[in-house]
Image (tube, helix red, strand yellow):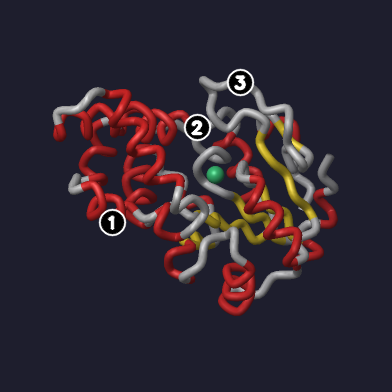
Amino acid sequence: MIDWNSIDTVLLDMDGTLLDLYFDNYFWTEHLPRVYADKHQISEESSAAHLHSKTRQAEGTLAWYSIDHWSEQLGLDIPALKREIRHMIALRPYTMEFLQQLHSSSRDVVMVTNAHRKTLEIKMEKVDISHWFDRIVVSHDLNSPKEDQAFWHRLQALHPFDPARTLLIDDTESVLHSAREYGVAHLLTLLQPDSRRQKRIDTHFPGIHHFDEIMPGDAT
Ligand SMILES: [Mg+2]
């Protein structure tokens, strides 16, 4: 599925790729609606519906990924609420082994995430994998989410890479489309980003279930 000899740079998404998306899905669809319902003395159903319509409008934009934005919009301390359920933050199977093997190869290994820096911090407090990366790039710092072409141009300007010899693994289809448009040649998605949800069957990109399917081994 992957010819490791033709890859120099590996770009890895965080949520739903390296980490189980269950934490994020649970936070936005259960934990936050409960807290918001409690605050406004409304039912959990109407709280969930309200939050869903509010967040949907911003989907795929930087604001959507910004917890400062949502703290302000909802009048809640989102980082503190995320910390309340931090015990649910977990690596996906084989993430550690995969990162270790990549780290010992000569490839450039970069985390590229749309997560807000505060979210990244909360997650790394629980599962610190940051030392396995040559760099961690937060799209907020580049002022564009991965869904926008500007992100890739700015990433290139900051840390030059050869798109023809680059692999991106990301569970978000719109991000993969954006990377393909930029010219990233090797693209993979995840078939089950959230361990508690159904496996996806409608992906437009080749997918893996777990990283053990694509271990680089000792090929450098
Ligand atoms: Mg993701």
Give the crowd class for mark 2: few <14, some 14-19, many >=20 residues within 10 Å: many
The residue at 32%/43% (across/down) is: 125
Q: Position of residue 150 (x, y in %)?
A: 59, 72
Counting residues from the N terminus, which is met first, the one under dot 1 or under dot 2? 2
Judge whether 107 appears above or below 189 on screen: below
What is the distance, in whole Å, between disc 3 and disc 2 at their CAs? Answer: 13 Å
Q: Which amino acid is tagged 3?
A: Gln
Q: Nearer the viewer, residue 101 or 178?
A: 178
Q: Is residue 100 left or right of residue 53?
A: right
Q: Nearer the viewer, residue 70 or 199?
A: 70
The residue where tag 2 is placed is 20
Which secondary structure lies at badge 3?
loop
Q: Which mark is residue 198?
A: 3
Which secondary structure lies at badge 2?
loop
Closer to the observer: label 3 or label 2?
3
The total of numbered circles placed on residues is 3
The residue where tag 1 is placed is 68
The residue at 36%/57% (across/down) is: 117
Counting residues from the N terminus, which is met first, the one under dot 1 or under dot 3? 1
The answer to the question of whether label 3 and label 2 lie on touching residues, with beta carbons closer than 8 A, is: no
The answer to the question of whether label 1 and label 2 lie on touching residues, with beta carbons closer than 8 A, is: no
Q: Which mark is residue 81?
A: none
Counting residues from the N terminus, which is met first, the one under dot 3 or under dot 2? 2
What is the distance, in whole Å, between disc 1 and disc 3 at their CAs? Answer: 31 Å
Q: Which amino acid is tagged 1?
A: Asp
Closer to the observer: label 1 or label 2?
1
